Amino acid sequence: MIHVGPSVSRKCCFELREWIIPESHPRRESLLEREKLVEGMCDGVVVPQGLIAHGRGECFDYLLGETSIPPALEAERAAAAMFHLAKHPVISVNGNVAVLAAREVVELSEATGALIEVNLFYRTRERAKAIADLLYAHGARQVLGVDDATARIPGLDSMRGLVSPNGIYKADYVLLGIEDGDRTEALVRIGKTVAAIDLNPLSRTSLAASIPIVDHIKRALTNIKRYYESMSREEASRVINSFNPRKVIADTLLYIRNRLETLARQLMYDYR
Ligand code: ATP
């Protein structure tokens, strides 16, 4: 049992992690990821609600087999293609994304030339700065959305709607992850192409996104970069012209159904 409660100091978080999760633990990676998020909360990067969102994601990742399934790869190829075609692409980063995949965000930004912007549901300047600092520590050269979030996305109330006029406000293409449905819907409504990384194929985000990517944030960003680097502009146009977001969601649901059916049959076979 891992106990990291509010009475445990940040230093203790690290000690407990090393001490309690042995190298041989079959779910070590997953548990380390949880610990990173708890640390992120101690550092003011992640909010408690982010931990709940992560748990929901983990559940869907189990159903997918913790791998990038074929419909996800198809969507990741389309997300990569959009980086070739967009004039002003932006990668939107929140606390969970920064903690789980800061390195992958920076590498994708470097490869594609996309800007990075901190964009938060629960926004405070301190939190935005802490996220930007984490990205800088991983090699980011510029992070928008800390002191320059002065423009507003219509349809998002109060602090939630604030974005940088030189980033998301101006963007024709936004790649985001682990995000709530309101923001995705609002960005699509004002005409942006939105690629959304979300392990839940039935979330409002996945259903509203122009390019729904049902995959873990880290795997998805790595795959998008790989596809981007091996694709020409002509190929990118072909990929986007034949991409259908509804089919990707439908294929994902069918994949999960088939996988569960196979697993159930195996269990019944072993039982006999
Ligand atoms: P919506 O508002 O879109 O219906 P929601 O209420 O679930 O969705 P949030 O609570 O903000 O929105 O959750 C964010 C989403 O991120 C969840 O659907 C969850 O499955 C997903 N998620 C969590 N962790 C990861 C991860 N590591 N990689 C990708 N997606 C993740």
Image (cartoon, rainbow, N blue to C red):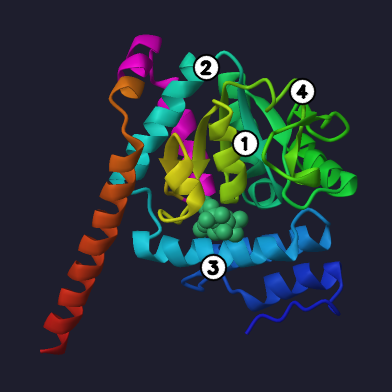
Indicate the quadrant where residue 119 lies: top right
**Disc 3 and disc 4: Cα gap in Å?**
41 Å
Circle 4 packing at 10 Å, graded few (<14), some (14-19), many (20+), is some
Which residue has dot 2 on it?
A: 86
Q: Earlier in the sequence, mark 1 or mark 3?
A: 3
Circle 1 packing at 10 Å, graded few (<14), some (14-19), many (20+), is many
Q: Nearer the viewer, residue 130 or 204?
A: 204
Secondary structure beneath label 1 = helix
Disc 4 vs disc 2: which is toward the camera?
A: 4
Residue drawn at point x = 24 percent, y = 55 percent: 254
Secondary structure beneath label 4 = loop
Instruction: Report if the CB atoms under discs 2 and 3 are less than 8 Å apart.
Output: no
The kind of residue tagged 1 is: Val
Which residue has dot 1 on it?
A: 105
* Residues in magenta, as a range: 216-238
Residue drawn at point x = 20 percent, y = 80 percent: 267
Indicate the quadrant where residue 173 lies: top right
Q: Earlier in the sequence, mark 4 or mark 2?
A: 2
The kind of residue tagged 4 is: Pro
The kind of residue tagged 2 is: Ala
